[in-house]
Amino acid sequence: MKESDMNKVAVLYICTGKYDVFWKDFYISYEKYFLPNCEKHYYVFTDAAEIYMEKENSRIHKFYQESLGWPDNTLMRFHMFLRQKAELETYDYIFFMNANCQALDTITEEEFLPKKKDIIVVQHPGYYNKTNKQFAYDRNPKSTAYIPKGQGKYYVCGGVNGGRAQAFIQLMEELKHNIDVDKKNGELALWHDESHINHYVWTHDNYEVLPPSYCWPEDWNLPMPGKILIREKSKWIFVDMVKSQSLSGKIKAVIKPYRACNCCDGQ
């Protein structure tokens, strides 16, 4: 296939602080397995001095991003990405991937790209077989991520999502606005960007839902094949310490309700 005939895809990736440990395996696996017939460009937001293959591959675009502390490293992702809006508008598709993603098998355009809709989201592996009474939605009516009890059809993960470029840029702009409103009002969505994405799914119908195969937690035994592994962060970094560091560097404790899986709760 000629490069000019390929779909052009932007892959958005954040690895600040210790999360850069995941980049090499992510990159190697995505080059091999993820949309192999597409022209993939990697937009990497990091404070690392150098990342694997950045000098050898012109499709790796590195942008300096200081660590914002927890939870802003994940909550403010749309703000980071939209600084490159002009470039991102030149792509056919845009996809965000968590830092600890690793492709396990070939993922084709036919199975992954949206068909009749514009956006793809992935069912959260901890909730694909649960009812909305059990979903970890934000129930705080003061937050723009609020979903009332009894509402909602799906609970989706925050770690894998994307779609047609213009539609995904519009999604990012809407969620950026909602996050800014929450910050102005002193509110923080329960599960940060994931709560906002679930609110988006609740209020829109322009998305297709993929199974948890594309958000498959390491060491889990799910009744479907894994295509995108979510690596266990605690095997690589001291996650609790990373998350407990505020912007001032002080340690703070955060108590939250139970959630079935925290695999996508990070960069």
Image (tube, rainbow, N blue to C red):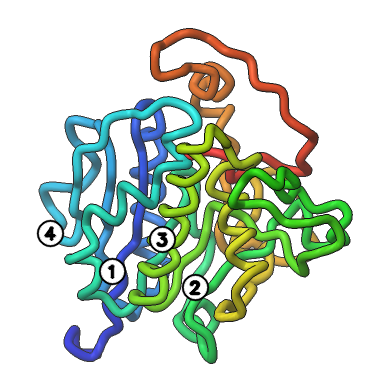
Q: Amino acid at mark 3?
A: Met
Which residue is identified by label 1? 40
Q: Element at badge 3? A: helix
Tell me, yes or no, whether the two marked residues, 1 and 2, touch with CB atoms within 8 Å: no
Asked if residue 167 lies left or right of residue 178, the reply is left
Give the image location of residue 207, x and y in percent. Answer: 57, 77
Give the image location of residue 179, x and y in percent. Answer: 48, 47
Q: Quadrant of residue 82?
A: bottom left
Task: Name above or below for residue 249 compared with residue 234.
Answer: above
Marks 2 and 4 sit apart, C-alpha to C-alpha, by: 23 Å
Residue at image position (62%, 65%) is 122
Q: Give the number of the mark in front: 4 or 3.
A: 3
Please indicate, yes or no, whether residue 221 appears anywhere in the rendered image.
no
- Chain-order first, disc 2 or disc 4: 4
Asked if residue 45 lies left or right of residue 203, the reply is left
Residue at image position (84%, 60%) is 132
Q: Amino acid at mark 1?
A: Lys
Which residue is identified by label 4? 58
- Chain-order first, disc 3 or disc 1: 1
Task: Name above or below for residue 27 compared with residue 85.
Answer: above
Residue at image position (76%, 51%) is 126
Marks 1 and 2 sit apart, C-alpha to C-alpha, by: 13 Å
Q: Element at badge 2? A: loop
Q: Give the number of the mark in front: 3 or 2.
A: 3
Which residue is identified by label 2? 107
